[in-house]
Image (cartoon, rainbow, N blue to C red):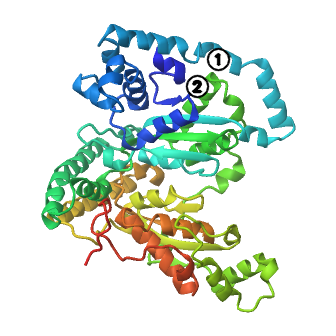
Amino acid sequence: MVLELFFSNTDQHVFLVENLPSNVRASLLAMYSRMKNERGLRGVFVDVLVTNFLASNLESVIANYPDDTPRFLRENHIRTLDEFADSSGEAAALLREFLESSTGNPGYIRKFANGDKTRKFLSTWLDQYGHNSIARLGEVVVCCEEISILAAKALEHPRAGAGFIELSTRYVDMTKASWYPIAGEIRAAGQHEMQIEDTFRMFAHVYLTQMERYTQFLGELYPDASEGAIFGEVCDVMANALPAATNTSVGCVVSGEALRSLIKCLLLEGLPETTALAEAIMAELEQSGLGQFARHVEPTEFEVANTHYLDLRAFQGDWQFMQTTDEIENRLFESFQVWQQKPGFVQWWIDFTSQKSRGDHDKLPPVFENALMRFKYTTTFRTWREIQRHVLSQNERTLLTPRLGFFQHSKPISDELKGEFGRIQVVTEATHAAFVAGGGVSLETLQYLVPMGFHVGATHTSNLRQLEFLCWQRSGWNVNHEARQVVLGFDAEAVKLLSWWKAVSRTDRTPAYRLAREKVGVPIG
């Protein structure tokens, strides 16, 4: 009864969030990052948000548990909304009041949203008059649960006009892990698929056993470190063993204008999973009266022809920088019309941006958006995901295959874990090669089989304002080591090219920290 007030369905993997205030919705979606409820976000909503809200209004809680409702729930062994409602007559009355006082009849609201007047107005102005700005005023909240990590990346591709939050790999319970059923597609292609489940079980076994043993290794190495810091480090490393088929969950808040791009990205990916995901989202939109914003989503021939992965052959070397000093400085110089005649332009700009008046959270001035930097690099698929999700810049990659090698940790790692990672690499390479030789299965589909610790080739393009923000945001001591190394690589190339970059960038250039989630940063060595 409660879920029907706020969600487009109560039992599907794809659903919309409706009728919730923005601050409550943001708090709810944020829980995706660390979600452990087996019933997903809707379970979190009724068991945590609603239950805590109602419990905080109980007279006994107000009197005996001020500002500590969770303690009341723990001490009374209340874990679900049903258990709360059954705990007392007062609790049951509070739930009835909640249902009666909430948004009303959701079916009637959807009927109103699908009314002829609304549909005709949007159809006329969006299609005939081309006023896409009207769609920008709309907003859709889409939740996709139990989808593969591979599909999640396609869903999150159109960054502009949308916000995303995904279940952290640190909270994947490998004792209950599930995967996209890639075996069915392999079987449909005429190949034997039994070894896939065996391989995934082997990955899960390595993950589970090494979580414990690598935790012990780091605990002995850093006896003064907190359990939380060591746990975070272990999870960051062990996530490299998870195949791209591992299921995750994603919450999206999308403007009406960006919704078409989101659906097109899923369709252009061309995988059965992403196509089904696009169709499921469209079905929920139509049911909720929001289908007007998802018009003309069928990819054109032009879009299909210009959608591709980067060429693997271009990524056999290390870092490559793809721009010249003159290109960047000329673009900046042209942007400063007022100061064009000022001698010593670059030195003047250094002095200006290095003033003490610039606070810790001040980005570079907007004028820096007029010059771009472009990078080509290799990193693990897991780390590429972290770089891709943080800025509104352009990020592309190659197919995920075993060809570019596997994760090599540059911080302390046990010999046993090195051996297990080596086994994962060998097994994946052999499995991938066998399916390629057998034919019938596309390289795009075979990405599901590959653990996230394998490398992809990638490009990153951002303007200097975005780049400086990225370098500041992702070079701190509390950032995953591999992502931090990529960002330090960006920064090092910028310093080589631009003598003044070191003065204006807030990059933390400490080579490495021992653990990412300690209370203070402790440099290695």
In the image, 293 versus 20, the foreground residue is 20
Q: Residue at x 15, y 67 (%)?
A: 221
Helix, strand or loop at mark 2: loop
Q: Residue 311, can we see it? A: no
What is the x, y in percent for residue 471?
A: 50, 69
Look at the numbered discs 1 and 2 and tell me whether their residues touch, using CB distance below 8 Å.
Answer: yes
Quadrant of residue 210 within the rendered picture: bottom left
Distance between the alpha carbons at the discs numbered 1 and 2? 10 Å
For residue 60, above or below residue 276: above
**What residue sits 51% from the left and 57% below the top?**
390
Q: Position of residue 485 (x, y in %)?
A: 40, 71
Q: Residues within 10 Å of mark 1 (few under 14, many from 20)?
A: some
Query: Residue tagged by mark 2?
Result: 19
Give me the residue at 59% from left, 72% from top. 357
Q: Position of 91 compared to 286: left or right?
A: left
Q: Position of residue 304 (x, y in %)?
A: 65, 51
Residue 449, above or below 129: below
Q: Which residue is most to the right?
A: 129
Name the one closer to the observer, 284 or 84. 84
Q: Amino acid at mark 1?
A: Ile
Dot 2, crowdedness within 10 Å: few (<14), some or many (≥20)?
Answer: some
Q: Quadrant of the C terminus?
A: bottom left
Quarter of image, res 305 = bottom right
Of the image marks 1 and 2, the number of the one nearer the N terminus:
2
Which label lies toward us, 1 or 2?
A: 2
Q: Amino acid at mark 2?
A: Asn
